[in-house]
Amino acid sequence: MQRMIGRAAWMLAGALGLALLLAAVRVIEAGPLDPPGPVGSTMKTLADLPPSWHQVLAANNTPDECNSLRFTCVMGKAAVLDNETGLVWQQAPSATTVRWSTSLCSSSGTGGRFGWRLPTFDELTSLTIPATGLPPGHPFTASSGPYWTSSLVGTDPQFIRTFNPLTAVFSSASRGVATSTRAWCVRGASAGDADAQTDFPTLWRARQLATDDGALPITSSRFFDNGTTSAVTDRETGLTWQTAPDAGTSNWVSAVNACGRFSQAFVSLGWRLPTLAELLSLYSFGGTGTLPTGHPFTGITGVYWTRSTDAASSANAYTVDTAAVETSTTLAKTATSARHWCVRGGPGE
């Protein structure tokens, strides 16, 4: 009996010693190892999981449309978080039709925040039930009719995919159309597909794009105006040009400085003189030496400076004479008879 009592004492002492050791290393801090009450579940619901596109959540499981499994109103109810995708949408998208541009949503201050953008086609359609539209119980005040996306129709740069979220009807529209389509801006990570909002690569395309196939000169396959008629982007090269360059003349240094300090509404700084190759890239050759039919530029006449220094003399710079484009010309940099036509983007070398 004494031996059994002794063993029990040693076992008790050992257990107490182990408890003290565990407490010392902060495995347990106080109280029993298994506190009273129900054991906590380790199972997670869909609401506990991070947003992903494989989820299907109910939008009408509560009487409060702002707090369903799927949708949560944020930013003082100015925006709505879609818990399925993690995207944040304007609660009240544009009620008026607007013209498409890559910067259509970038100036939106919905909810007191910037960072808004046009959704891709996949993102906008993710809000809806196929062949039905927005799900029952949704918190949005959207209008019936098509909304712009940032996605092209195939590879045609002139047409944009549109979508009516109230009826789930697909359509498309020309980027030059001014009064047919609304915008519904979104915040958050992109779905990742190639779209028209992504910057066009700044490479010179081997194929030529049409300049006269749009409703306006600034909305053709080749040229588009970024939402302002005072500057256009050439999709063949990725360069952005003034549509109406300054009519005044100056020496080369003044021209370089004028472009370097030039600022355009909605485009800001970053302008420069073009290289000889860049300026000539706007022209058609084969004996014509003219700007292509349907081009958007105005007031183009006379001789224009380039930033390319004459290889034979650093005191001279190459110029482009619009009356003899196919003839290489140079001027002394001190001459005051040439104009400047500013450009933005590209390497500038």
Image (cartoon, rainbow, N blue to C red):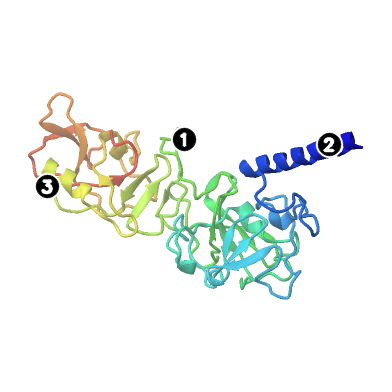
| Residue lying furthest front | 2
Closer to the eye: label 1 or 2: 2
Left or right: 256 with respect to 165? left
Q: Disc 3 residue type?
A: Ser
Residue ID at (49%, 46%) = 198
* Residue neighbourhood size for the residue with mark 1, other residues' Cα within 10 Å, grouped as few (<14), some (14–19), many (≥20): few
Inter-mark Cα distance, 3 to 1: 35 Å
User: Whole-percent x and y of residue 304?
Assistant: 20, 43
| Residue lying furthest top | 312
Left or right: 42 with respect to 191? right
Closer to the eye: label 3 or 1: 3
Residue 296 shows in this picture: no
Residue 176 or residue 5, whichever sits in front: 5
Q: First in sequence: mark 3 or mark 2?
A: 2
Rendered position, 197 above or below 17 = below
Q: First in sequence: mark 3 or mark 1?
A: 1
The residue at which mark 3 appears reads as 250
The residue at which mark 1 appears reads as 207
Q: Disc 1 residue type?
A: Arg
